[in-house]
Image (cartoon, rainbow, N blue to C red):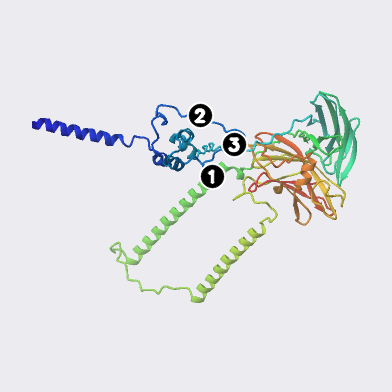
Amino acid sequence: MPASTRHHRALAVFVHCLGILAAVPALPAAAPEAAAAPRTPAATRPSVATRPPPAVTPPPGATPPTAATPPTVAATQSAAAMPGVPMAPLVKATQPPVAVVARVAQPTPPSAPPAVAPPSRPPASAPPQQVTVAVAPESSPAPKYRIQVRNVGNAPVDTTVRQELPPGSSPTAISAGGRSTRAGGSTTEVTWRLRLPAHSTTTLGTALAATAPGQPLTAPACAFTSDGTRPYDCATATWKAAPAPTPAAKVTEAPPWRRYPVLLAGLGGLLLISAALVWVWRRRRGRRVTAAALASSGGGTIYPRPAAPRPARRRRTPPVWLLVGAAVVVLAGVVGTAGWTATRRVSAIDTQKQPTSGAWMGTAVTGPVGVPLRESAFEFTVYRMSCGAPGTAGSADGGAAFANGRRCQATVGVRNVTGDHQPWHGQMQRAYLPGGRWVSTDEPATRAANLGRDVFADPMAAGTRMVLPLVFTVDGRDPPQQLELRSGVFSAGVRVHMP
């Protein structure tokens, strides 16, 4: 055989071997059970191209085969080894290796669903108002208010309208159907009981006696349900007296010594006169010294004369006791000034004032009832506060119960002034009692006053407004003196003085 032919054959064998080695990993891997199973006759062996038969559902009386008890290949081998036993039944009972592997293999578990973030709690929106209230002051010498109550529903509504008058004021005129009652302390309340037809508007009016001339007066009004417990809507208005015309002030010319140009001109002239006097004095002194020198020399003396040596003089220093005394006086003055300044600054600190900087957000605001007060996120308006008799705080509504306790219900308007929904918490709303004691909102009683709705559960939507009752359970006979309302833990909040 020529050398070139031998080389070609060797190269062809090498290439075929590489092709076989490259094709071996691509072959399907046989299961251990299929590899261990014996070869079956060609008549009973399923073809590779033949699709495996579908699974047969066992009859109701038969026991379904499980993965732990499949028909084993060892039983087939033992039956084939026994002489005289026909193989036809065994061949029919024997399943193909592919079917055995399909039953033994564990089913693939389903893939986990994609991770989805839990849905956020939607912000709470104010329930639709069936009755709306609007209050406006009138331009008059005495305080007057106009109240418009409107029913926006499709059915008649029975409502109770209450207007809280400023402390110390008394009504002089009330529209038909209203009556004034003493609400406690120095506060007077005007009440109307109305039946509003569907889509109607009723106008009410009150006139007050001014307590102090020129003092602004705020009188909020609210529309409640027929029993007077749950508010529909509230509004407030502040009456301000028209400013009296003031006569034009007569402009009087200031005296000459209080005019700046005259003062500057006088100061400049004084400086010029002083400079001229100093120049004249030095000129005359120079002449006197020259005349005295010429007189003492007798005529022909060389000028200038050589300076005669002066005797050395000892420089005088202040005594030690004077230096020590001056130092002690200066030190005592510095220490005294520092102590006096520190004492004044410490005494000027108001311990009752709420912090308005540092970790607190916003500035603390204080005001009376009926005035909107804004903090960092909410605008609060307290329209009225009513307290029950001592000992009436029972546990029927689920709230706290004291032996001498009572419920105080505040009608509060809350408006979200931010561009995002804001949460708020019942424990942050406080009522301060005499002596510095305070209580938080009684959440079970507040939920019962709002007909089972938890007003603190959901955040308030941006730009929404709600009028709702907040219930505080206090002990003793003294009502709360202040209400502290805030949107968050680090909010400076607002304080409302109770009348």
Mark 1: secondary structure? helix
Left or right of 320 in this view: 42 = left
Left or right of 292 in this view: 115 = right
Q: CA distance from mark 1 to mark 3?
A: 126 Å
Mark 3: secondary structure? loop
Q: Which residue is mark 3?
A: 62
| 2 vs 1, front mark | 2
Question: Alpha-carbon neighbours of circle 1 within 10 Å: few (<14), some, or many (≥20)?
Answer: few
Which is more toward the observer, 156 or 362? Answer: 156
Which is more toward the observer, 328 or 159? Answer: 159
Mark 2 and mark 1 in contact? Answer it, CB < 8 Å.
Answer: no
Lower sequence index among marks 1 and 3? 3
Residue 317 appears in which quarter of the rendering? bottom left
Can residue 369 be seen here? Answer: no
Residue 460's spot in the image, x, y percent? Answer: 67, 37
Q: CA distance from mark 2 to mark 1?
A: 118 Å
* Amino acid type at mark 1: Leu
Q: Which residue is mark 1?
A: 264
Q: Which residue is mark 2?
A: 54
Mark 1 and mark 3 in contact? Answer it, CB < 8 Å.
Answer: no
The circle drawn on residue 471 is: none
Which is more toward the observer, 320 or 50? Answer: 50
Residue 444's spot in the image, x, y percent? Answer: 77, 46
Left or right of 498 in this view: 350 = left
Question: Alpha-carbon neighbours of circle 3 within 10 Å: few (<14), some, or many (≥20)?
Answer: few
Asked if 411 appears above or below 131 in the picture, the reply is below
| 2 vs 3, front mark | 3
Asked if 72 appears above or below 141 in the picture, the reply is below
Lower sequence index among marks 2 and 3? 2
* Amino acid type at mark 2: Pro
Lower sequence index among marks 2 and 1? 2
